[in-house]
Amino acid sequence: MLLEALSAAILGLALAWAATRRLPHRLPARSLVLATGVAGALFGAFVTHSALGAASLLAVLLGSAAVCAASLSLLLRPAGRLRGRSATA
């Protein structure tokens, strides 16, 4: 279980770092993104391990990556302002 937690934390850190490198203009401060990535990955590993029991490490890491990506997506800001009113307004 310690290996799962350490692997999930490293995976969350890697996904958060990739997000900050790819979308720096759409994310808040880097420290918040990195902390959210690690926390989301650890929570995902916990939920997956609780749901599947003594499953393989790969299954736990897949669940961890899914929850990490979902938590990082909540931090994204819109790309730009709306240019005008829509036709229905």
Image: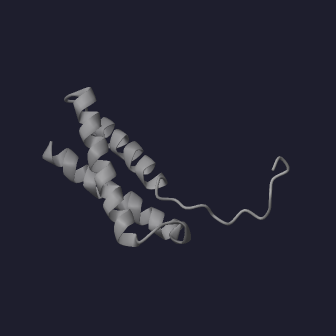
Q: Depth check: 57 or 16 in front?
A: 16
* Residue located at (54% from left, 66% from top): 26
Quadrant in the picture for the N terminus: top left
Looking at the image, the residue that sits furthest to the left is: 2
Q: Position of residue 75 (x, y in %)?
A: 46, 58
Q: How many marks?
A: 0
Q: Position of residue 11 (x, y in %)?
A: 33, 54
* Residue located at (31% from left, 62% from top): 35
* Corner quadrant of residue 4: top left
Q: Residue 5, relative to residue 81: is it above or below?
A: above
Q: Depth check: 87 or 64 in front?
A: 87
* Residue located at (40% from left, 58% from top): 15
Q: Position of residue 3 (x, y in %)?
A: 17, 47
* Corner quadrant of residue 56: top left
Q: By what rule are the colours in the image chosen?
A: one colour
Looking at the image, the residue that sits furthest to the right is: 87
**Left or right of residue 17, residue 7 in this image:** left
Q: Residue 34, relative to residue 40: is it above or below?
A: below
* Corner quadrant of residue 31: bottom left
* Residue located at (14% from left, 47% from top): 2
**Left or right of residue 71, residue 80 in this image:** right
Q: Depth check: 4 or 78 in front?
A: 78
**Left or right of residue 9, residue 15 in this image:** right
